[in-house]
Image (cartoon, rainbow, N blue to C red):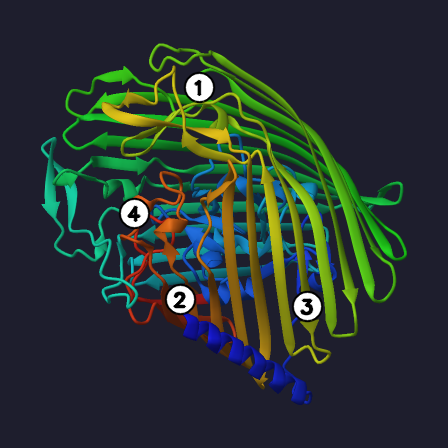
Amino acid sequence: MKKHLYFLVLCSFYGFAQNKSDSTKTSHLEEVMIISQKYLKNKKNISQKTEVITKKEIEFQNFQNTADLLSNSGNVAVQKSQQGGGSPVLRGFEASRILLLVDGVRMNNLIFRAGHLQNIITVDENMLENTTIFYGSSSTLFGSDALGGAINLETKKPLFSSINKSLFNANLNSRYSSVNEEKSLHVNLNYGLQNFASLTSFSINDFGDLKMGRRQNHNNAFFGERDYYVQTNNVVDELVANNNKFIQKFTAYKQYDFMQKFSFKQKNGLTHDLNFQYSTTTDIPRYDRLTDVSGAGLKNAEWYYGPQKRLLGIYSLNKKKFIFNSDLSLDLSYQNIEESRHNRKFGNYNLQNRIEKVSMFSINSVLKRKFNKSELLYGIETYYDNLNSSAYSKNINSGAIETIDSRYPNGKNNMFRNDLFIHYNESINNKTNWSIGGRIGYTILKSTIKDNSIFELPFDSINQSNLTYGLSTGIIHKTNDEFSLIANLSTGFRVPNIDDLAKVFESSAGSVVVPNENIKPEKTLTADFGFRINSKNKRFEFETNYYYTRLTDAIVKDKFTFNGASEIIYDGVNSQVFASQNKGKAFITGVSFSMKTFIIENLLFTSTFNSTLGRIIDDNKQTPLDHIPPFYGKIGLNYSKNNYSIEAYMLYNGKKNIDDYFLNGEDNEQYAPNGGMPAWETYNFKTSLKVFKKATFYAGVENILDTQYRTFASGMNAPGRNLYGGLKYSL
């Protein structure tokens, strides 16, 4: 990998030199705006590190889902346990320690786990206007969970007519991919008048079994091939040889996404918006669990997630100069999420079914007032989450049904949080901009166990209340027109949820996680420093950032006792007991940089690099913290002119040594080769061509060398060579 880094550095200096000497060209980097309910600013004026994936990039890159969009950006690491998933990692934080938002509304709920999540795929990438990634503690701005940062998925808005005549346009996108025989279709329709607009969006995605690479990774031997799988014939489980070991049998699924938006403008300045989104899937096989070995065979005959359903409804009210000369943005939202797990061991004909249904209600009120050289943002947020958890087993032969232990307490489970926040930003002069913000909140969690007879716990209810607070400040100082120094200091917090406190589940073969009611919020203090270079001719950008995060009361899974025993029988297996615990202190530190430069007219060179280190500090010794990816990044060239664009890029990852794994945790060492996860790189090529005024053709080859590899902590191999083609037709 070192040679790739040397290449990156050399190209960076080369690009810089070229741009400094060539100011006569017309190619320039576009201004990037941060767009959300709380931000509408030029990226250059925000001290917090942010990255924006624009609608133009989303359309050109043409990835199959939102998780793939992030993982191929070179700015986010993503873990996968199955094809129908993708768990983003920001600065060594993952899952419930980063915050996902769609149109400014929290997706995180009371069962967001600390392990790996697949919720991000429920937001259709075809619906996105842009995706903004906020790095570093963002609790002051967004609330609990945003320890490593936040990802805001902003969907497209209805377009009004600018004249006294109705506006209608439509887009149809189709795509086929060879690596999993993907067939996707997306349609959106927009109707607009001067005061009313409607946007309708619908997507169908059909993904077949995923093929892994056939060519050996030069950093490792062949690994992860699917030699056998389980097939049930006449209600008898059989171990069957795979006739193509490079096809990851049982990774196929389908997904359906729908969005409807209405917007209405009143003459008095009020704007009303309705936003309805619905996503569902077929059953999604949990591929890593289907490859778990038991003796000479496989452990599980079936392991799949039921249809993952996400319903979101938002009513938004916006009014200029509402009160105290402040602009109002008010959101009332409702979400309904359903997920389920279904598993059956080989030779055991009782299929276990665990179903979770979550309802979320929220009110977000944001007021914004602009002064001559400053801006004040303040408001209140209220969220109420409710969970119903149930479970049963069904014999696939006899149909007999029995009650089994549910994943979460089977009584009443809810969380109620209320936060007040304020954020102030001021331009002191033409060279210096600073900001300061604060948040205070109170969270109540209640959980009761209705039936304690199946898995007898030493308590029948959990009640917690936590006062939370966060502070942040940042500064940008321009030493000249091209060079800026940046510094930020912020605190973060994450309130334990039902998943942290009260879950019972099998983490891996021979280990079981049990409830622990005695955990408290984890907190962070983060400092980061960096600089930016933006050339006057807008042909060169460079940003680097160093950060250090200190965690206190970090919640990690570690060995525990249950009713005084360190091992118990769970699901017929003698299992080591683990539980979520506050393990004193930990730290995460790292560095990142990104660069864009025009080498020659229309030829853009880009590169990113990210490196992270995390350690738990316990009894004056340091041990690895989980969720820390090896160094990774992206190097690319893009040539765009008139009606076509061409891009070639390399994605790369360093090696994750087994000594740097958090064993028996979420790093999933059981799904890695001996010695840890090897380094890898892939080479990719993409193009788009506007064949005529209303039609654009997209095509490309991903993983050109068909390299066999697996990303860190993942339980399945990454896609092999993929040839894809797509067409966008606009009316």
Q: Which residue is mark 4?
A: 671
Crowding at mark 3 (Cα within 10 Å: few <14, some 14-19, many 20+): many
Q: Is 34 left or right of 603, judged from the image as shown?
A: right
Q: Which is more foreground, mark 2 or mark 3?
A: 3
Gap in angstroms between the C-alphas marked 4 and 3 = 39 Å
Tell which of 172 and 573 is nearer to you. 573
Residue kind at label 1, given as amino acid type: Pro
Q: Give the spatial CA distance, label 1 vs label 3.
A: 50 Å
Real-space Cα separation, disc 2 to disc 3, in angstroms: 37 Å
In this rendering, which labeled residue sits more in front, label 2 or label 1?
Answer: 1
In the shown orientation, is residue 303 left or right of residue 188? left
N-terminal-most mark, 4 or 3: 3
Marks 4, 2: nearer the viewer: 4
Vertical side of 418 occupied by 89: above or below: below
Give the foreground label among 4 and 1.
4
**362 displayed left or right of 720:** right
Q: Percent position (x, y) of residue 634?
A: 47, 67
* Residue that label 1 marks: 409
Mark 2 or mark 3: name the one nearer the start of the chain. Answer: 3
Quadrant of the drawing holding the N terminus: bottom left
Residue 48 against residue 686 in the figure, above or below: above
Check contact, mark 2 vs mark 3: CB within 8 A: no
Residue 51 lies, in percent from the top left, at 60, 60
Q: Amino acid at mark 2?
A: Gly
The disc label shown at residue 172, or none: none
The residue that disc 3 covers is 532
Q: Is residue 214 visible?
A: yes
Q: Secondary structure at mark 4?
A: helix
Q: Which residue is mark 2?
A: 726
Cβ–Cβ under 8 Å for marks 4 and 2 = no
Secondary structure state at the residue bearing disc 3: strand
Rendering quarter of residue 470: top right
